[in-house]
Image: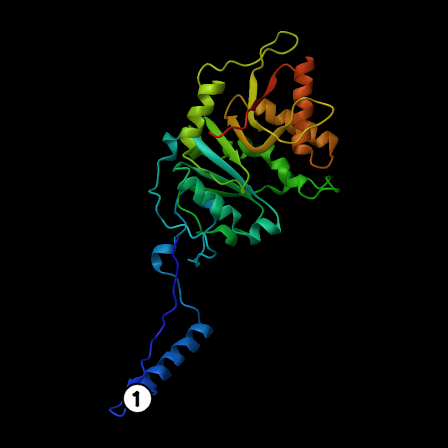
Amino acid sequence: MTSYRSVQGSFRLRQNHHGSKRLLTRTNAMALLSLLMVAVTILIEPPSFPDVLVFEAPQNSLSKFRGLSPKRLLRGDYVLKNEEPHIDFRLQKQAVALLSFGQDAAESTLLERCVLSIRRRGDFHGPVVIITDAPSARYLNVFDENVIVLKNREEDMKDYFESDGSMKYRRFKTLILEYIDNIPELESVEWVYYLDIDVIMGQPLDDLMDQLNEKYHIKDSPKHSIAANGATPSSQLYFFKNSKTSGLLNFFANSGFIIMNRHTSKYCLELWQHVMDSRREDNFDEASLHVIAHLFDRGDETNCQLVSMDVEDY
């Protein structure tokens, strides 16, 4: 981040040989007049940011998602410098996915702050995929070349969640892998980590995943529960436990952080979407996970297991 300080002039009081104070010499008066003219010019026409903070939209096959237009100034307190060398997407095994929907998100800098934390404290320099309904100009040229901004498909925006307008946005969590499947450059990605944009990384993402993998065997020979009828589930999603409680079920997931396998998690995501669409209730993104976990525990669902991870100081 770069901070800009206004230019400040200092004018000394001169002492004559009698000890009296002469406020301004003729030279100082002219300098003051020049400074005032500069200040007026700045107010009328704000200065541009340095070129190092401005990016061109990359001329590659992803341009159909990002859109192309002239340079524009970066804005907000979370300015992302072009610190990221362009990576070969075909070699990447991990990706981060983010959603930015609604006017509040577009008018805030939550997304910029989240990406900045992923890059810096999270020390993750792989592909970051953003799905958004914001106008294309909003995020154009704001991020480094390894961030892919996708416009949502209008047919995915369901309006039947009338009592809770944000539900139609949360539903896109179930569509993340479907959108990533439409990016040929990310064909090699095997693991996708979803974060809510108000989440801030506090440590390297690889370190966090190593700790979670050691405890839950996510990536190497996973050891999962057996369904009530003895079947072994073929699809998993990983969440942290939620601090909320319910008197009906013994499971409640926080959907602000989700670990998805590119291939095996699709069934769980489709089931999650189906339950969400059929219930259409307030805040039913997490409550629908609650229902799926209960079905698994009861043996009515055997293919999808929701793995609830303890909230610890990782």
Name the residue at the front extreme. 19
Residue 42 appears in the rendering: yes
> Which secondary structure lies at badge 1?
loop
Which residue is the extreme one toward the top? 230
Residue in the foreground of this view, choosing between 159 and 280: 280
Residue under pointer 1: 25
Residue at 69% in and 24% down:
291
Task: Classify 10 Å Cα crowding around label 1: few (below 14), some (14-19), many (20 and above).
Answer: few
Q: Is residue 182 above or below residue 31?
A: above
Q: Given the image, on which type of amino acid does mark 1 rest?
A: Thr
Vertical placement of 265 versus 161: above or below?
above
Q: Position of residue 14 (x, y in %)?
A: 29, 85
The spot of residue 84 in percent (x, y) is: 35, 43
What's the residue at 33%, 76% (across, down)?
A: 10
Q: How many marks?
A: 1
Pick the front one: 302 or 3: 3
